[in-house]
Image: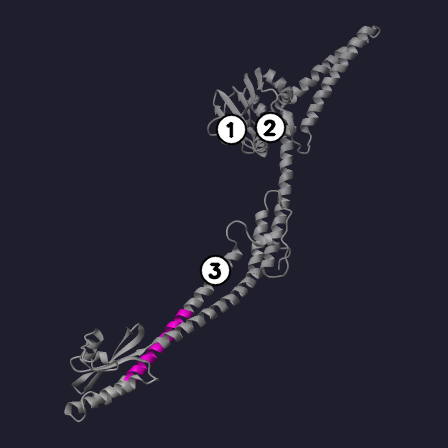
Amino acid sequence: MWEGMSSEDKVIKKGLGLQYKFILITTFAIILQMGIIGYITVEREKGILYKEVERHGRLLGETLAIPIINDLIYERVGLIEEGGLLDNYVMEIFNKRDVDLVYIAILNEEGKVISHNNIKEYGKIYSDILTKRSFESDNIVIQRITYNRRPAIDFGVPLSIGKKRWGTLKFGISIEKMEIEIIAMVKKIVILTLFFIAIGFSIILLLSRRFISPITYLANIMEKTGGDYLNIRADVKGYDELAILGEKFNSMIERIRQANEELKKTHEKMVQSEKLASIGILASGVAHEINNPLGGIFNCLQMLKQSSSNPNLKEKYLNLIKEGLERIESTVNKLLWMSRKDEHKPVNLNLKYSINEIYSFIDYRIKKNMIKFLAEIEDNLVMLVDPHDFQQMMLNIFINSIQSMPRGGNLIVKGYKENSKIMLEIIDTGEGITGENIDKIFDPFFTTKPPGEGTGLGLWMTYEIIKNYNGEISVESEVGKGSRFILSFPLSG
C-alpha cells in the first residue's frame, strides 16, 4: 500500500501518534473485556459452588434430622440412655471424610448444647443470631461464617414433628476447598487473559501497521509540506481506499505546486508592472535629466559650426558634449537597472549611499513641487538587502509622500540603529491619511488617487518586501499635517 516509510515517518512527533492511540485503546478494550468476562465467570462459578454446598448441606440436614428426632424422643420416654446414642451419632457424622464439617451440634428447645463434636461446648447456651433465627423458623436457616479462622457455611435445621419442636441441629460445612478452587480458576482466567492479550496485541500491531501506519506516514508528509517545499510525494501501492487517499494527496500537491508557480509568476508581473509604473511617474524627471544635457549638446554643436577653425574652442565644446552624453548615459543606465528583473541577491548595502542614489530619480519632482528634502542617515549604516528591493521599497514611499505634497512641504528620511534593529523613518508634511483609510493602505489595489496616477500596488509591494526581510512597517498620520512611515529590520549577522 505504501512504500518507502522510514522509522521516523511512522510516528507523528507532536503528541501521541494515531498508531499508538489505536494500540493503547484496543489493548485496553481487550483487557477490560477479558476482565469483565473473567469477573462474570468467577462470580458465576462461585455462585454455582456455593449453591452446591448449600444443596449438599440442606440434604445432609434433612437426612440427619429424622434419626436425631427419633433419638430425642427415645431419650425423652426413657427407651435409651440420655446423650450416649446422640454423641456417638454426632461424632460418627463429624468424622466422615466425604463431608468437611467444621462443627456439628444439637441444641434443645432452650438453645442449650446437648451434643457436640467438641466436649468443651457441652452445656453452653447459644444465643447468636443464627440460633435465634433457627428457633424462630420452621425451615433450614443458612448463613456464611468464619469458624476458627476457617470460612464456612452455617446451617440451622429445626428438629420438629408437626408443631412440636424438639430442638435444633447446627453444623458448619467448610468452604476452604471451594475457595482454593476459585483461586485456581482465577489464576487460569488470568493466564488465559494474558494469552489472549498477547494474541490480541499481535493482531492489533499487524492491523495498525496495515491500516494506521499509512495514515501516520501520510500525516507526516503533510506536516513536512509547506511554503515552497512541495517537491514531495507519497509512495502509493495498491488499490484500496488508503492508496486512493495517497493518490489524491499527490494530485493535490501537484495542483498546489502549479498554482504556486502561477502565483509566483503573477507576483513577478505585478512587481515589474509597479516598477514600470514608478518609472512612468518619474518620467517627467527623467525627461528633464535627458533634455538638459541634450540642449547643451545642441548648443555646443552650433558653436562648433561657427568656430570650427579654433582648436581651443573646439576642444572645449567637445568636452562639454562628452560630459552631456555621459549624463544621459548615466540616467539611461539607472532606468535600465531599475526596470530590469534580476535574481534576488542580498548584499551589505550602505543605506546612506543608496538613499542618495534613489534621490537622483526624484530630484526633479521634489524641486518641481517645491519640496525640501533632508536625509539624516547614520554613517556606515549597513543592511543585508537586495539593492533592487531596497530601491523599490523606498521609491514607493517617496513617490507616495511627493504626491501628497502638491503645494510643497518637507520630506525627511532618518536612518539609525535602535535596540538591535535598523530603523528608517520617512516623514512628510503632506495631506495625511484619513482614519478610515490608514488600515487599508497596504492592501493590494487600494488607492485614493485619480485614475492614471496610481496602481494601488506601491505600498502593498513595500509591505511585502519588508516582510520578506523579517521587518515591520507602521504608519502614523494626521489629516492636514502629514504622515510618518516607520520601518524596522533586524540587524544582520
Q: Is residue 406 visible?
A: no
In this picture, residue 311 sits left or right of residue 471: right
Instruction: Indicate whether 189 appears above or below 324.
Output: below
Does residue 349 appear left or right of residue 142 in this picture? Answer: right
Residue at x-position 60% and y-position 61% = 240
Rendering quarter of residue 141: bottom left
Which residue lies under the disc numbered 1?
474
Q: Which circle's residue, 2 or 3, is located before the other in the chain?
A: 3
| Membership of 142 in magenta stretch | no
Q: Are marks 2 and 3 in contact (CB under 8 Å)?
A: no
Please tell me how many numbered marks the rendered image carries. 3
Name the quadrant containing residue 493: top right
Q: Are marks 1 and 2 in contact (CB under 8 Å)?
A: no
| Residue closer to the observer: 54 or 416 | 54
Mark 1 Cα-neighbour bin, 10 Å: few <14, some 14–19, many ≥20: few
Above/below status of 352 relative to 156: above
- On the image, the x and y values in percent for residue 352 come to 62, 21
**Which color scheme is applied?**
one colour
Q: Which residues are magenta?
A: 38-60
**240 vs 141: above or below:** above
Q: Which residue is mark 2?
A: 393
Nearer-N-terminus badge (3/1): 3
